[in-house]
Amino acid sequence: MSGVDIRLPSDESEALDCLIRALAADGAGKVGYDVLDRKRLPGSTNLIVRVSGDVPTRELFVKRLRAKSQLRHEAAYSNRDRPRVKPVPDPASRLAHEAAALMAIEAMVAQAGRSDWFAVPVLSVPECPNMLVLDRVDAPTVSDHIDRGEAQEVVDRAARSMGEWLQTLHSSVAVLPHARPHLRNPGELAELAEEMIDFIGSRRLHRRRTSILDAIAVLPSDFELVPSHGDFAPQNVFVTDDGRIAVFDTTASLLLPRHFDPAYFAVVLEFAGFKRLLPRSVVAAVRLAEQVRDGYGPTLPPRSEILTFELVLLLDRWCSVSRRPARSARPVDAVRWARRQGLALHLDRAIARRVDQLVGGS
């Protein structure tokens, strides 16, 4: 009988029982598990599970789809929820794609032979569908280091390595069968930007429409598409105390312009959860993005082109906070929307700053 520390719904208990049976299939005797942590996210439930008994004790990270995630996915597309710079992944295939991507990254890291890189091992458990099982990595992420005010210490030592890792992903990882091209040329990028500007509905932003579209128009006529992480962000990079890195949480389902991942990293670093940082920490975060770009090397596109992608990603982030709740919504939703208006103003200023940089040729 499993010793569970946290109360689980019956379907999650059954899923973990399935996992234990699969782990014990090689002839191990008694195997049990303890649930150390459980976190509910919009599309999945994440569990930290310790496995012990007649097998070596190990801690696993288990991601399992939530029951209504497919319904939410279908509703978002049928209602055209909002313009998005990236398509929402289909929950029915997301975990399988994530497992395939992490295994491809594991092969890439092994082939590179770098002592400062490591991979997050994936456990193949075909007996348990809709479940992703990884060995738990006991290391903080870049976000954790920044929250602790350590960006100038541990993370700075790993920043160049992160850029080199990203360049290797773009240039040498195998293109997965489920990967699809996206944002293939400036025309597609401009169409998306116009949709987002119209969705946001800001008069000040509308006055910048021409400048934004002009910045996109001068990009190369056809982008070089590369295997993209798609969510290369501070919360998805482990950094050990001795500066070793591992990157996780990707389906690698899109072939995107080489500009996308460096631009995404910079925007998330600046606008996802770090508003409480002291000014000197913000300066350190900006320098971190620069160090990652320096580590990427000479195949990185020009800075002005990356700024244009940052501009579109800022629009995407503004779309996520701009929808006013319906009159029938719960009071708490109205409060959340009111709080988000501070972020919307911050994004508006950032977009103005990016436009000025582009016009000035920075």
Image (cartoon, rainbow, N blue to C red):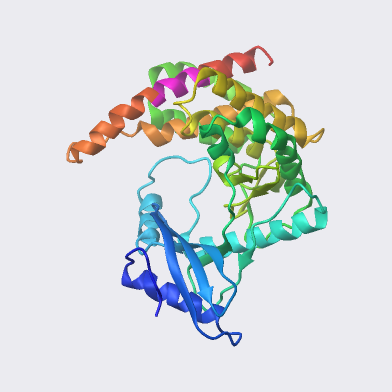
Q: Is residue 306 left or right of residue 19?
A: right
Position of 326 with respect to 300 (left or right) is left
Question: For the view shown, which residue lies furthest in the top direction?
Answer: 360
Rendering coords of residue 88 (x, y %): 48, 50
Magenta stretch in the rendered image? 343-351
Residue 299, how many percent across, how many down?
A: 80, 36
Residue 194 seen in the figure: no
Q: Residue at x 62, y 46 (%)?
A: 238
| Residue 122, above or below 186 | below
Along the viewing direction, whichever of 65 and 226 lies nearer the viewer: 65
Query: Predominant secondary structure in magenta?
Result: helix
Q: Is residue 192 magenta?
A: no
In this view, 13 is above or below 362? below
Q: Quadrant of the N terminus?
A: bottom left
Q: Is residue 247 left or right of residue 6?
A: right
Name the image quarter holding residue 219: top right
* Residue at x 59% of width, y 55% of height: 137
Q: Is residue 228 above or below residue 313?
A: below
Tell me if residue 344 is in the magenta stretch: yes
The location of residue 67, given as percent across then percent down, is 36, 64
Q: In the rendered view of the protein, which quadrant contains the C terminus?
A: top right
Q: Quadrant of residue 59?
A: bottom right
